[in-house]
Amino acid sequence: MVVRIKDIAEKANVSMATVSLVINGKPGIGEKTREKVLRIAKELNYRIPDSLYREKMGNGTIRFLKIAKHAHTVNRDHEVFIADYTDGLSREATINGYGLEINTFKTSNIAELVDTVKHLGQKAIIALGTELDFKDIEHFERLKIPVVFIDTYFDFFNYDFIDMNNIDAVLKIIQHFVENGHQEIGFLRSPVKVRNFRLREIGYKNALRHFQIPYNEKYVFSVDSTIDGAYSDMLQILKKGVKPPRALFSTNDIIAYGCIKALKERGFSVPEDISIIGFDDLPLSAVMEPPLSTLKVSKTRIGKIAMKHAIIRIEEMSKMPAEKVLVGGMLICRKSVKSVKQPD
């Protein structure tokens, strides 16, 4: 399909004259509008002169660090949502004329990693903090350039952290179960030391308290955070004769996939016997049987916000206090939850 200026204008909610000025590099358009039009044009594969994207080239490189400290979460199973982060980072870097370089590090020696990066030459660093802990973050203080962390946050550090609002997100999940009549709601947790996982467990307990549902430890199941590991661990739990509750919240979609496989193998049906909600809205969730209800937080948006923060720190030499940004999510309702409400 041929993309026209009219198509870009409609999607950007601006006039065709505005689009024309932008794609021809003419003055008189605000920076935010210009960025929006260029981004949408790129999304629609409209051919824009390369010079428009290179106006600020020479500003340097911003480096994205994919850090797999123990690889329980930053691994092949999770590559899709990491790609969404990268997409958001790349879009924002391109629009602002910065180069984006991506490096993957599989190491638990974060001090050595920081020493390596220090000599690569970049204007700022955006680090995937999924598997990093408090002490790991401390090592980045040796860098004298802006550093922004995504997929985690910590207090007491003078860095920008862009993460998802786990506590609020889990409340939406538990509320959906409650609205469908569920009062026995279990939790598929992971023992892996990931801050977001821990926050989701806190969110689960807080939400139960909010809806005045007693916390029952026998409804909390600890499994690995990979598909195969979650399947194997859940299968062993079920073989011991454990009967899960009628509803289960899973720390993420990956764990849900493995546990659903184990549940089906042991004769449980989803959602007839057990309702399940995941977290992340990975592509497989929409096509599995049954399609998995899950909580979606835009990783692309998180990537874009992180890049905006990095660029502000570079260009304005910002001395403002660090910002912790929590991005909200929305519940995607599919067919893995059954209503057990009694008729009035």
Image: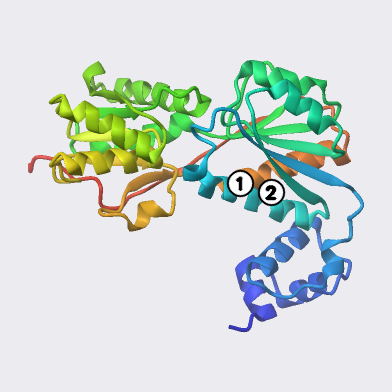
Q: Is residue 43 above or below residue 321?
A: below
The furthest residue to the right: 58
Q: Residues within 10 Å of mark 2 (few under 14, many from 20)?
A: many
Q: Answer with left or right where residue 13 lies relative to residue 316.
A: left
Which of 61/169 is in front? 61
Coordinates of residue 88 in the picture (x, y in percent) = 64, 51
Point 72% across, 65% down: residue: 37
Q: Secondary structure at mark 1?
A: helix
- How far apart are the two marked residues, 2 and 1, measured between alpha carbons? 6 Å
- Residue 278 visible within the image: yes
Residue 320 appears at what percent x and percent y? 80, 27
Residue 252: image quadrant is top left
Tell me whether circle 2 and circle 1 mark residues in contact (CB < 8 Å): yes
Q: How many residues crowd mark 1 within 10 Å: few (<14), some (14–19), many (20+)?
A: many
Mark 1 residue type: Tyr
Reading the image, the residue beneath label 2 is 89
Q: Residue furthest bottom?
A: 2
Q: Residue at x 43, y 48 (%)?
A: 281
* Residue pictured at 43% horizontal, 54% vertical: 283
x 70%, y 53%: residue: 90
Q: How many marks?
A: 2
Residue sitting nearer the eye, 271 or 213: 271
Q: Quadrant of the N terminus?
A: bottom right
Quarter holding residue 191: top left
> Which quadrant holds residue 244?
top left
Helix, strand or loop at label 2? It is helix
Q: Amino acid at mark 2?
A: Leu
Residue 57: percent from left, percent from top = 89, 55
Horizontal relation, residue 130 to residue 15: left or right: left
- Mark carried by residue 85: 1
The residue closer to the viewer here, 21 or 329, is 329
